[in-house]
Amino acid sequence: MDIISQEISNTPPVTSAYISTCFLLTVAVQLNLISPFQLYFNPSLIANNFQLWRLVTSFCFFGSFNFSFLFNILFAYRYCRMLEETWYSTKTADFVMMFLFCGTLTIIIALFVNMLFLSHVLTMMLVYVWSRRNPLVRLNIFGIIEVNAPYLPWVFFAFSFLLGNNMMVDLIGIFVGHLYYFLEDVYPNQVNGFRILRTPEFMKYLFNRRQINRDYEPLPEVGRPGGFNWNGRE
């Protein structure tokens, strides 16, 4: 229990809020307090019945408790936490802005593509951005092959193909992640480039005032696994 409580206390705020919401929604569904039909993305119900919570809950439900749920939520936790610790430890507002931008873009795409839950798109986006920002990390995948981190999203895409999953979801996540990465990391560094995604001042005021936790211990930078138990190394 001490290890679990320490892990929870060391988790940065945005990651903690997102993963906690995902977990609580799954528990509520398992206890039959709510139904997945109340959570999925439905533009008609959002627009006509003002069920605005679906704009959030569709990103926070990975399904019932099973291996797939465990796999997906661990990956979401891992890459969300590593991004927040490495790139946004003192810029919480910018990380929230990343969620808002990528979430909004995903919702716009979902209006034209049949997707009920958007959580896997968000996870793939997090994986893509992390992989592009860590190009030197090598990942040993299940002890079978080694790839550089930027190829990790495409490995996931290949697994989706082999398992017969909806590959469109992976492609949308990769597209959303790439657009964010391009606007945030690539274009501003080009000749005559500038930063397009600017975090509003009120968000900085709200989110960047948190006190530093002196007992906080981030995940070690050297030797971090790129995925859980994948033995990633630099």
Image (cartoon, helix red, strand yellow):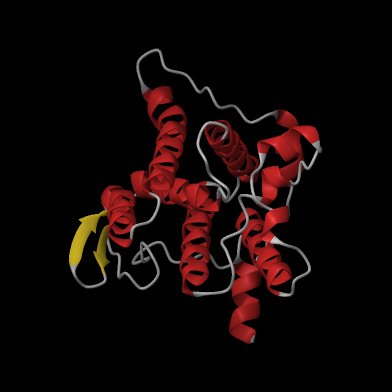
* Residue closer to the observer: 132 or 162: 162
In the image, is residue 183 above or below residue 206?
A: above
Q: Residue furthest bottom?
A: 1
* Residue closer to the observer: 77 or 28: 28
Figure quadrant of residue 185: top left
User: Which residue is painted at 65% across and 78% down in the image?
Assistant: 5
User: Which residue is painted at 57% across and 64% down in the image?
Assistant: 63
Task: Where is residue 228? Give x, y as percent.
Answer: 40, 69
Task: Where is residue 98? Give x, y as percent.
Answer: 56, 39
Please state if 6 lies on the left or on the right of 150 as rendered. Answer: right
Please state if 164 lies on the left or on the right of 58 as rendered. Answer: left
Please state if 175 lies on the left or on the right of 14 as rendered. Answer: left
For residue 215, say whether it is visible: no
* Residue closer to the observer: 34 or 93: 34
Task: Where is residue 68? Give x, y as percent.
Answer: 47, 68
Task: Where is residue 86? Give x, y as percent.
Answer: 48, 52
Q: Residue furthest left?
A: 145
In the image, is residue 174 above or below residue 127?
A: above
Q: Residue furthest top?
A: 192
Q: Quadrant of the C terminus?
A: bottom left
User: Which residue is painted at 71% across and 46% down in the image?
Assistant: 54
For residue 160, say whether it is visible: yes
Q: How many marks?
A: 0
Please state if 159 lies on the left or on the right of 218 as rendered. Answer: left
Q: Quadrant of the N terminus?
A: bottom right
